[in-house]
Amino acid sequence: MKKTLCLYFQVHQPYRLRQYRFFDIGKNHDYFDEFANKTIMARVASRCYIPANRIILDLIREYNGAFKVAYSISGIALEQMEQFAPRALESFQELAQTGQVEFLAETYSHSLSSLISPRKFKDQIKVHVKAVEKYFGQKPKAFRNTELIYSDTIGEMVADMGFTTMLTEGARHILGWKSPDYLYVNALNPKLKLLLRNFRLSDDIAFRFSDNKWADWPLTAEKYAGWIAGALEKDDIVNIFMDYESFGEHQPASSGIFNFLKAMPGMILNHTNLEILTPSQAAAKHQPIAPLNVPYAISWADEERDISAWLGNELQSEAFQNLYKIEDLVRQSNDPDLQRDFRRLQASDHFYYMCTKFFSDGDVHKYFNPYDTPYEAFINYMNVLSDITLRTPKK
Amino acid sequence: MKVLMFGWEFPPHISGGLGTACDGLTRGLAKHQVRVLFVMPSASGDEDQSAVRIINASDVTAFQTRKEARELLEKVQFLKVTSNLIPYLGPDEFEEQVDLEREKEWNEFRISFGQKFKFSGKYGSNLMEEVMRYSLVASAIARQNEFDVIHAHDWLTYMAGIAAKRVSGKPLVVHVHATEFDRSGENINTQVYDLEKRGMEAADRVIAVSNLTRNIVINNYHIDPSKVFTVHNAVDFSTVENREITRGVPEKIVTFLGRITFQKGPEYFIEAAYKVLQKTKDVRFVMAGSGDLFNRAIRRVAKLGISSHFHFTGFLRGEDVKNMFAYSDVYVMPSVSEPFGISPLEAMKANVPTIISKQSGVAEVLHHAIKVDFWDVNALADAIYGLLTYPALSAMTVRCGLEEVNALKWDNAALKVKQIYESVTEEKL
C-alpha cells in the first residue's frame, strides 16, 4: 500500500481593532481598524494567496489528480477577502472547482469557544460550514480547531457533529515515544480519526526555510522529498500543516519558497511508493493504530504546545470571561450588527496579543501584532468589550 | 581592585537620588571585592562606612609646599579662571606676563587654598566655586592615596576626576546620572554643559544609567559610542513594609509624586485627569510635590474645573511618601525626560500599579509597568482608566511588577561596573 503525504494550509486574518479609548465607550461603535485590515489583507493576497494559488492550480493540472491539498479559511478571513481582496477569493474558488482541494471546517471566528462551551462551539462551526458551502460548494467532512487546539472532550464534540476526521498537533508531550506519522483515534469516540502534524517537517518549511544559519539551509525540494520518503519508509502518513502565509509572507518570495512549492510535489511523486492525499482521503485509507489520550488541551503554538499563549495569564482570562458573559444576550438580540462585531471580537488573535510569555523573544507573537505591549492590547480590547456590553440589550 | 570615587552626597544627608545610587553601587562593589575610597565635599561623620571608606574633602589640605603647589598648578591648569589671552604682545612680553600671572596665581592660591576649605556640599549659589575647589582637593587626595581607577559621579565631580587623573595617570570613569538636557530641556546652562562634556571627553569610559541617557551622551555631547556603556540603576529596599491605611475617601486615588517641574511632565497628568474625570467621578487625583510649575498647575486645575477631585499636597518626605503610596491605586510618572527614575520602582514595591513614560530610562528595564508617550494624554488617560476599571490589569501589574522590582539588584549593576573598571585597567597595562 502506498504511503501518504497530506498537505493542509491555514488561512486566517483577524479584524484588528483600532485604537479605542475609554472616552469612546458608549459613544462610538466603530471598533475595527479598516485601514490596517484592508492593507494587510491586500498585501497578503498579493504576496501569498494569489501567487501561491496560481502555483497550486498549475500543480493540480500538471499532475492530473495526483496532487491534492486542503485549506481551512476562517469565516472572518473569507469576509475580509471578499471585502478587500476579491481576486484572492476567486482564486480559491477556482481551486475548489478542480475537485482536488478539500476545505476543512473550523469555528467561523477562529475563536477559542471550544474551551468554554460546547453549544457556542458547535454554533460557530455550523456558521462556518454554511460559509464553506456558500463559497466553495462543498460540505466539509474534516475539522480543524483554532490553532489546532484539541483535547479528548473537544474531539468528542466534533465527532458528535458528524465529522469523521480531525487535525491536531503531534505534540511531543502527548506522544512520548510514539510517532505522529500514523492515524490515531479519539479516546472517547473512536469514530473520529486524528491526523497529527509532523512539526519537525512542517516547521522546516514554515520557520526554517529562509534561515541561512540552519545547518540544512538551503532546503531544496529534492532534499525535502528525501526526508519525507525517509520518514515514510516505516510510518504511514506525514502531515504537513502550516499557515498558508508561510509562502511569500513569513518566508519571502526572494527566499525561493515559491520555486520550492512548485518543485516539491514532483519530487515526492517521483518516489513510486508515495502519494499525496487530502485529510479525509488519508483518514479513510489508513488503519488507525491507537487511541490518543489528551486530557488537557494542546495546540500547535510555541514550545509548550498548550493553550497558554491565549489563556495563560489573568488579563487573558478576564477578557475571555467577560466576552462570553454577554454571548447569550448577543445571540438573542436580533441585532445583526451587534452579532457581527461580537463574532469578530472572538478571534483568538486578540488574546494572543495579550500574551506575556515572550517579553524577550516574541518574534512569532510580534507578527502583525498592532500593540507594543500586552497591557496596551488588554486595555484596548476591554474598552471595546465595555462598549459592546453596553450595546447589548439586557433582556 | 581599589577605586577612588568622587561623589557629591551620600546617605543619610541627601537631596536627590545621586547619593542613594552611590550608596547602592558601593555596597554592590564591596560584594565583588572592589574597595572604594569615597570622596565627598562635606561628610558629617554619620555616613554608613561598612562598604566604603569616606574621605571628607573639607578635612584635606590642598597642598603643603610651594613645590607641590607649582606642580599642581602645572597639571591642573585647565582650572584657571583667568585667561592668558592678551592681544598685541610680542613673545618676550607674553613670557613676562605669564610669569607675572603665575606669581599672582600662587599668591591667590596660598591665601585661598593653603588651608582646608570648608565645603558646603550643597547645591547653592557658589556651586561653581565649590566644584573648582573640589577638584583641587581631589588632586591632593589622588596624590596621597593608592588606587587603580577613578570614578566620578555627575558633572559636579567631573573636574575632580580629571584632576585626579592628571595627577595620578590612572584611568577615569565618569558616571552620568543626569545630563543638563534632563535638567533644563533645550535651554541648557552652557557652563554646566561644558563641564559635562569635558568630563566625558577626558574619561576612558562613560557609564550611562540608561540607553536613553547613553544616546544623549553620544548625540548631544558627541562622545565616541564605543566608550559609552549603559549600566541600569538598581534599587535595594532595606525595609519591606506594606502598611495598612484607612482611607478618608471611598474613591480610588491616582498619584503623581515628584518635583512639579518641566522635566516631570505634571501638565500631562493634569490633562489626563481631566479626561478621566469626564467619564467617571469615582476617582481622585493627587499631585504630591513642589516645584517651579506648582502655581501654574493649581491654576490649570482650577481652570479645568476639576479642583473638587484634584488635590495638591505640597512637598512630601519620609513617612508621608510611604503613606501616599499606601493610599494610591495608580501611580503615574509622565516624565518628559528621566535618565532613570527610581520612584516607579518604589511604587511597584508598595504594590501600586504604575504608569511610566516611554521617555524614562526605567522603562528600559520594566515590562510590567504600563508605558505611554508623555505627550500622549489620551493614552495616559486610557491607561489610568484601564487600571481603575479592569481588576485583572491592576492585579497582574502588581503581582508581576513586584517580582520584577525585586530582581533589580545593585549586585548585578556593580558587577557590570567592575567589568568596566577591568576593561580600562587592562588597557593601561
Image (tube, coloured by chain):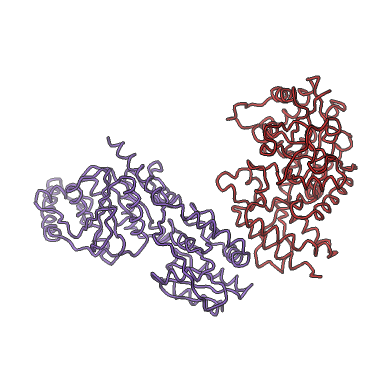
State the residue at coordinates (30%, 51%): B152
Q: Is residue A365 above or below residue B9?
A: above
Horizontal side of A347 relative to B135 (left or right) equals right
Viewer-proximal residue among A73 and A314: A314
State the residue at coordinates (58%, 58%): B396
Query: Which percent across, then down, holds residue B52?
Result: 27, 53
Q: Is residue A73 visible?
A: yes
Which quarter of the picture shows residue B19? bottom left
Viewer-proximal residue among B133 and A183: A183
Q: Is residue A55 above or below residue A46?
A: above
Image colour for chain B is purple
Which quarter of the picture shows residue B183? bottom left
> How many numbered markers are drawn?
0
Horizontal side of B4 relative to A218 (left or right) equals left
Quarter that holds the N terminus of chain B: top left
Viewer-proximal residue among B27 and A55: B27
Which quarter of the picture shows residue A101? top right
Query: Which percent across, then down, holds residue B414?
Result: 37, 48
Query: Which percent across, then down, holds residue A254?
Result: 66, 32
Which chain can be seen in red?
A
Q: Is residue B371 visible?
A: no
Query: Which percent across, then down, holds residue B298?
Result: 48, 76
